Image (cartoon, rainbow, N blue to C red):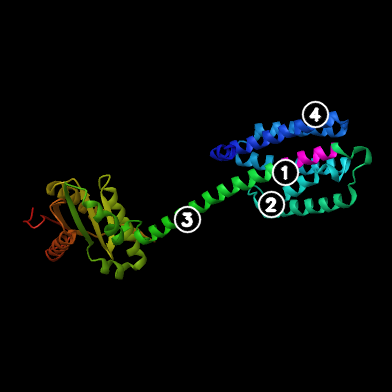
Amino acid sequence: MLLNLFARYGFYVKLRAMFAAFGLIHAIYLALFIYIGQPLLACLNILSVALYAACVYAAKDLKTAAIAVAAVRIEIFAHAFICTLVLGWDYGFQNIILALMSMVFFSSLATKGVNNFFAYAKGAAYLFLYFYAKTPPQLAGTQAECFYILNFIVVAAFIIVLVVDFSRTFSAKLRQEMLERQERLSELANKDPLTGLLNRNAFYEFAVPRMQFLSCDASIVLCDIDDFKKLNDAHGHAFGDEALKIIAHAIKSSLREGDLVYRWGGEEFLIFLSDINLENSEHIFERIRRKIAETQLEFEGKSAKTSATFGLVNFNVKAVKDVEAVIKQADKLLYEGKNSGKNKVVAQAFGGDYL
């Protein structure tokens, strides 16, 4: 229950709570050291409690949190080392050093080199204490056993909280990375890398299935840049790519919110407008046609103008069962416009006559 509650809070709240818990543990040590007549260790714990109070107050952003964590790691290590030297191996403070060594696997607030340095330093200190830290006879016995049990509980609680919270964080991070990877793959599959527009696959995967839920009139428009091959031949493919990006932006920026533009292939675009009649559709694309014709295409010191032709079909989404038939009609209108002078909008109701 406590671990579940702890896991719900944000990183900085949990970090400050951990510092407060460490401060409370050191306050308990302070009382115990006074009780057993260890003034040096009692003074040491007064400094430790003050440090944890400062860390609770200061750890509010990544920079101060990193400094606080480093200070705490040094304090815990120094405290455990000095207590083991003074009281000896039987009191169990050396086990805290072992627990600290595990932080190298969990800490992301320090570099790998810093973590490795701390791990090696603690390992060397542990070996030193193993050989030289002997408990004086007058301090051995039941008192030492009680301290050993207390320190064991502290170490066990620290490791359980650390491992459980880390596993939750790791699982959440793993899920997040999987979702981000899926989003990147979906973006690669459904977005045109040159213009940033959705592509043909996105139209069939997302737009077409959603049309069954619409009952309004809509328009599908095919747009083709006029004489694009000549533009490429005259100014180069890089200029042509820039022209595609400029025209894609001109179309998208001229539409209503909710209207969709797709890079259909080559120099061709498909546009889907929902909840609109034939007359208003043609009005929008006449404005877009003029905007493209008036746009000066510029790239790497080269300049040119071009135009575009549009085949527009307005239809009732509920009445049309096959969107391919609408696209074929728009394609036919597009090429009628191409063959009759280009730079025009040819509009028609689905299955009907020209506007």
Q: CA distance from mark 2 to mark 1?
A: 16 Å
Q: CA distance from mark 4 to mark 1?
A: 19 Å
> Comparing marks 2 and 1, which lies closer to the viewer?
1
Q: Position of residue 39 (x, y in %)?
A: 87, 31
Residue beneath disc 3: 178
Mark toward the start of the polypeptide (4 vs 1): 4
Mark toward the start of the polypeptide (4 vs 2): 4
Name the residue located 78 percent from the left edge and 50 percent from the top edge: 122
Q: CA distance from mark 3 to mark 4?
A: 50 Å
Work out whether 159 lies above or below 306.
above
Name the residue located 36 percent from the left edge and 61 percent from the top edge: 189
Q: Which residues are magenta?
A: 143-154
Q: Are marks 4 and 2 in contact (CB under 8 Å)?
A: no
Q: Position of residue 268 (x, y in %)?
A: 25, 62
Residue 15: which quarter of the image? top right
Which amino acid does the dot numbered 1 rest on? Val
Label disc, if present, on residue 31 of the rendered structure:
4
